[in-house]
Every structure is written in structure tokens, then in C-alpha cells.
Image: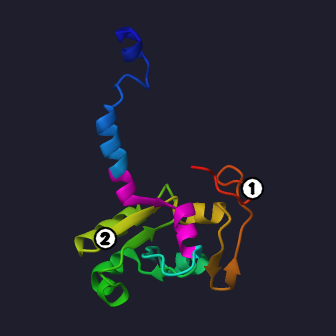
């Protein structure tokens, strides 16, 4: 590639990081994030998944639907209620509405500042539902048809 091509191409205007820097960045990213498919698979497996899931949304949002087995702990209540609801030796996975919401990030920060090991569930509750995983509401268990843009319609793994 020519230098001119690099400066006019919006993707390559800033050159890619070195392979070593990219490996460090992506490795770190995986230490901070989990996706809904991985969380669902871990929760569905036999035995203790080794983490707890925290829904950081409001009570109205929780009642509308939440991940089965999740703990309801709105972000604003984390400082006063985390110690009574969470074991500090167990990693926490936070979620909020979806990718357009940073509530899970704020909750993860609040928990990390209290000394908890924490990851954020990418996609949040929106992608949990869009991928067709069961969820609980105040009316009982629900399940949506998987969105073919977010999950294999055959129910198999995406292969990623």
C-alpha cells in the first residue's frame, strides 16, 4: 500500500496496531467482557457457573424481563446493598438494557471500586432476548423467537 492510500482510506488513516499491541488489547477486552451466548451457556451447564449475574436496571425494567437467576441490584444501590447480596469471592457479570446503554458499565465500575471481580455482558438484556434465551417477567418465563441477525435460527452455536 502507498502512503497516499493510507491517508485517504478512512479505515487505514490510522494504521492498525502492531500484532503484539492488538493481542494485548483484545486479551484485556476479554477480561472485561462476556457475550450473552457465553453467559447463557455457562448458566445452562450443570454445576456452579462460577459467577453471578447482576441486573443493574430499575424495578420496572426488571419486572419487564430479566435473565433467570440474576440478582436485581440497580446501579444507584450498589454501594449500600452489594455487600449483603454478593459474595466478594465470586465474580460478577453485569448487564443493563443493551448496547446503547452504559448502565452495565457504570454498575461494573461501582462493583470494581468495591473490590469485586466483574465483567460486563455485551449486548445486555436486549441481545439476551434477541438471541432467543428464556427470560423471566413478573408474569413468568418468556422466550422470544431468535432474531436471525443475532443468532443462528437452527439453535446451533454461531461458531465464533
Tell whether 46 sits left or right of 2. right
Residue 36, percent across and down? 54, 63
Residue pictured at 59% horizontal, 60% vertical: 127
- Residue 25 showing in the rendered view: yes
Residue 105, percent across and down? 37, 62
Q: 22 above or below 30? A: above
Q: 98 above or below 2? A: below
Tell whether 11 sits left or right of 146. left
- Magenta segment: 28-43
Residue 77, percent across and down? 34, 81
Report which residue position mark 1 lands on: 153
Looking at the image, the residue that sits furthest to the front is 46
Closer to the chain start, of discs 1 and 2, is 2
Residue pictured at 31% horizontal, 70% vertical: 117
The residue closer to the viewer here, 59 or 142, is: 142
Report which residue position mark 2 lands on: 117
The residue closer to the viewer here, 49 or 120, is: 49
| Residue 32 among magenta residues | yes
The residue closer to the viewer here, 117 or 46, is: 46
* SS type, badge 1: loop
Amino acid at each position: 500500500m502507498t502512503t497516499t492510500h493510507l491517508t485517504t482510506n478512512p479505515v487505514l488513516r490510522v494504521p492498525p496496531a502492531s500484532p503484539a499491541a492488538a493481542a494485548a488489547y483484545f486479551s484485556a477486552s476479554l477480561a472485561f467482557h462476556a457475550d450473552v451466548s457465553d453467559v447463557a451457556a455457562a448458566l445452562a451447564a450443570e454445576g456452579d457457573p462460577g459467577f453471578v449475574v447482576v441486573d443493574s436496571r430499575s424495578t420496572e425494567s426488571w419486572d419487564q424481563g430479566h435473565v433467570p437467576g440474576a440478582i436485581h441490584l440497580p446501579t444507584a444501590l450498589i454501594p449500600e446493598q452489594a455487600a449483603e447480596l454478593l459474595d466478594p469471592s465470586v465474580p460478577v457479570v453485569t448487564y443493563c438494557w443493551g448496547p446503547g446503554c452504559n448502565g452495565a458499565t457504570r454498575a461494573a465500575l461501582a462493583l470494581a471500586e468495591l473490590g469485586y471481580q466483574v465483567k460486563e455482558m455485551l449486548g445486555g438484556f436486549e441481545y439476551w432476548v434477541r438471541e432467543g434465551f428464556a427470560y423471566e417477567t413478573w408474569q413468568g418465563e418468556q422466550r422470544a423467537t431468535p432474531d436471525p441477525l443475532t443468532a443462528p435460527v437452527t439453535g446451533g452455536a454461531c461458531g465464533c
